[in-house]
Image (cartoon, coloured by chain):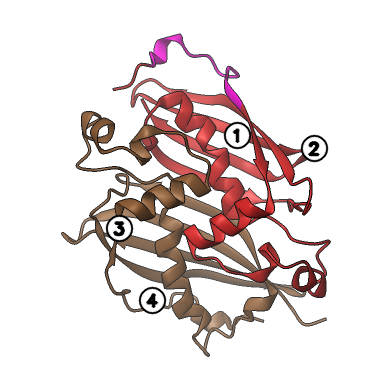
Chain colours: A brown, B red
Amino acid sequence: MVNPNVEGKKYAATEPYLVGREKIREFARAVMSENPLNFDVLPAQAAGYEDIIAPPTFAVVIQERSLKTVLADPEADIDFSRVVHGDQRFVHVRPIVAGDELTSVLSVASVKNVANLSMITFNTEIFDSAKQLVCTAISTLIVRGEE
Amino acid sequence: MTHINIAGLEVGQVIGTKEFLLTRDSLVRYAGASGDFNPIHYRDDFAKSVGLPGVIAHGMLTMGLSVQVAVDWVGDPGKVSDYSTRFTKMVDVDAAEGAVLVVTGKIAEIDAENNEVRVDLTTMFGEIAVLGKAQVRVRL
């Protein structure tokens, strides 16, 4: 069972992640995007962006880095081999753009232990180098208890 | 602003349908792109050892490709301001055949004041809906 005392716990900001064009293109191909704004600089600039922009779920790459900190936290006591993804949400202030340097701050919004399951919800706030909020990623993991 | 005129939209209107073929290759590609290397997404022996029927797709891959229907419609992925879903069913991806997902987007809510709409997505794997409450908020 996940330790309910980690509810409200806030983890240290991650090291900056520099969003590269090729990483966006790689991710866009992987989610089967055919949108030119994910691949080509000129149409992205014509649409008003500095560079190519990321698909709407790209922030999961940043969220993943924060999650690793929690999964490695002995206090939280999460058995990763028993984790399934329950739900996911991304709230964007603006899209992620190639060239962004992003840091993320993760906090545990809630921990619920019901029967043989734990549900833990995280908020990951993603900031650019000007400390402006770009996206909030909200994720619930379900951890199955021991048989 | 986009090419879409909010006044011409109706709740219930279908904005697009798209078919996606997921193969084991797609899963490996997504693992590399996302950094999610959980072996349940590429190793049958491992997947079976944790009680799964075999290799399953990343929920986040299903989420990521489903939203493309809304993106294709609006034309600009940066117009998606809010996107959420539950992962209700697994997509087991056959080594030889792969798995076909059919995604349909429908207008669910029209907010003319803020020039925003909510699009609800349905992602079918055969007869099974694999996402629950997949909702996309789009700025027009």
Amino acid type at mark 1:
Leu
Tell me whether circle 3 and circle 1 mark residues in contact (CB < 8 Å): no
Q: Can residue B78 be seen in this view?
A: no
Q: Which residue is drawn at 38% across and 78% down?
A: A11
Q: Give the range drawn in magenta.
A: B4-17
**What's the CA distance linking mark 2 and mark 4?**
41 Å
- Residue B60 lies in magenta, yes or no? no
Q: In this view, does B139 lie above or below A117?
A: above
Observer-nearest residue: A119 or A85? Answer: A85
Res A19 label:
3
Q: Which chain carries label 4?
A: A
User: Residue reaching furthest top?
Assistant: B8
In the displayed structure image, the side of residue B71 where residue A96 appears, left or right: left
Q: Are marks 4 and 1 on the same chain?
A: no
- Dividing the image into 4 quarters, which one contains the C terminus of chain B? top left
Above or below, comparing residue A107 to residue B31 in the picture: below
Give the residue number, with chain letter if any, for mark 4: A10
Q: Residue B126 carries which label?
A: 2
Question: Which label is found at residue B136?
Answer: none
Q: Residue furthest left?
A: A130
Earlier residue among tags 2 and 1? 1
- The residue where tag 1 is placed is B121
